[in-house]
Image: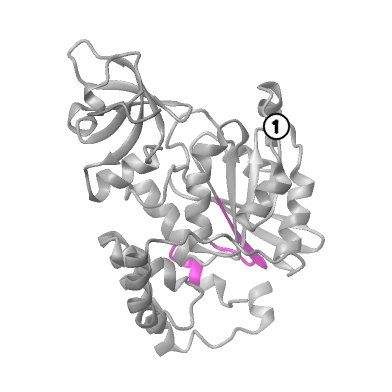
Amino acid sequence: MDHKEMISLYDLPIGAEGRVVSLEVSGVMRRRLLDLGLVPNSLIKAVRRSPAGDPTAYRVRGTTIGLRMEEASKILINRL
Amino acid sequence: MSCCKTDRLEKYNIVSNDQYIIALAGNPNVGKSTLFNALTGMHQHTGNWPGKTVSQAHGSFDYNNRSYTIVDLPGTYSLLSNSADEEVARDFICFGEPDLTLVVVDATSLERNLNLALQVLEMTDRVIVCVNLMDEAERKRIDIDLKQLSKLLGVPAVGMSARSNRGTEKLKTTIEDVLEGKIICNPVRQPYSEEIERAIAEIEPEVKHLLQGSTINSRWVSLRLIDDDETILKSIEKYLMEIQENHKMGVNEPCPKSAILG
């Protein structure tokens, strides 16, 4: 039921939800994202985008976090 | 139990003649400082903004004729992302060699908070998980099975509402029981993939040898080395140099009990 289409988190439209598949980053940034709760299979929802188009607010594990396009585009998700 | 705390704690600007040192860790904004005040009867400033506890504040309390120093660490979501706050917290838990670490978690968002708890459990054995804000959770109709949580984590889990002083007595008894060996902590340790486990097995004997005579967890240090964490390398180097110097000066000899108790 989950495996619809794999896209980058940045391409998830506002209001839509997905599940994290993988993080295509390494090192400190990877650690940071994992600590924010972005682990495989986490449910994530795009909440709103700043007027300039970047960053975007996402809801994950009960908290809203802001991610830049740079990071969001490296997070692969399955859109639900 | 390790000796000569005074020397060990000096580098953290902590002067203590108390019997036991307790570290207080937790995510930002879970009521760590409120719990600190409830335990010590102090009035350390509490406030709702990040980074309030810049460096460690410490205070003490007595319970059943035993004295405890409690060190309030900065609030962090992790101990591995290498911000200044996280390094302070990590280095104290690891190299300050506290007798016990309290991890305060928010009952209303356990899932997020357990990330830090699991990281601490990976570093050290003697841990108590304080599930704070139980009153808030009740209001939100969140029911927490403390027995099951404790069973899963392998360490005691104590429910509290530090704001209204609920649970502090129970926490003090639990602290005593753990430190007196009446409760044995047996924290869950995350098994890793075969590849990583093999790498750990390869370097851990060497790491263990280097850390001889300390209570530092060699598996955890091995994992950080595999992680290519440079900041931990610096901290370990500093720590090892201090041990060596102390050896030279003969400080590592066991202290007479009177020296600890002042």
Q: Which residue is located at x 32 percent, y 66 percent?
A: B195
For disc 1, the neighbor class at 10 Å (few under 14, some 14 to 19, many from 20) is few
The amino acid type found where label 1 is placed reads: Asp
Q: Position of residue A73 (x, y in %)?
A: 19, 31
Q: In the picture, residue A71 is in which quadrant? A: top left
In the rendered image, the quadrant that contains the N terminus of chain B is bottom right
Q: Chain of mark 1?
A: B
- The answer to whether B241 appears left or right of A25 in the picture is right
Q: Residue at horizontal 30%, vertical 67%?
A: B225
Residue at image location 47% in from the left, 70% down from the top: B217
Q: Tell me the magenta residue range.
A: B8-24
Q: State whether residue B51 appears in this view.
A: yes
Q: Position of residue B125 (x, y in %)?
A: 58, 65
In the current view of this chain or complex, which residue is farthest to the front?
A1
> Does the magenta run of residues contain B233?
no
Colour mode? one colour
Residue B153 sits above or below residue B241 on the image: above
Tell me the SS state at disc 1: loop
The quarter of the picture where residue B22 lies is: bottom right
Q: Position of residue B133 (x, y in %)?
A: 65, 33
Q: Is residue B120 above or below residue B131?
A: below
Q: Going by the image, does B158 lie left or right of B99?
A: right
Work out whether B145 lies above or below B157.
Answer: above
In the rendered image, the residue lying farthest to the right is B64
Magenta includes B22? yes
Answer above or below: position of B50 versus B180. Answer: above
Q: Point out residue B96 in the picture as x, y percentages from the top left corner.
A: 48, 65
Residue projecting furthest to the top: A51
Residue hosting label 1: B143
Question: Is any atom of residue B13 visible in this view?
Answer: no
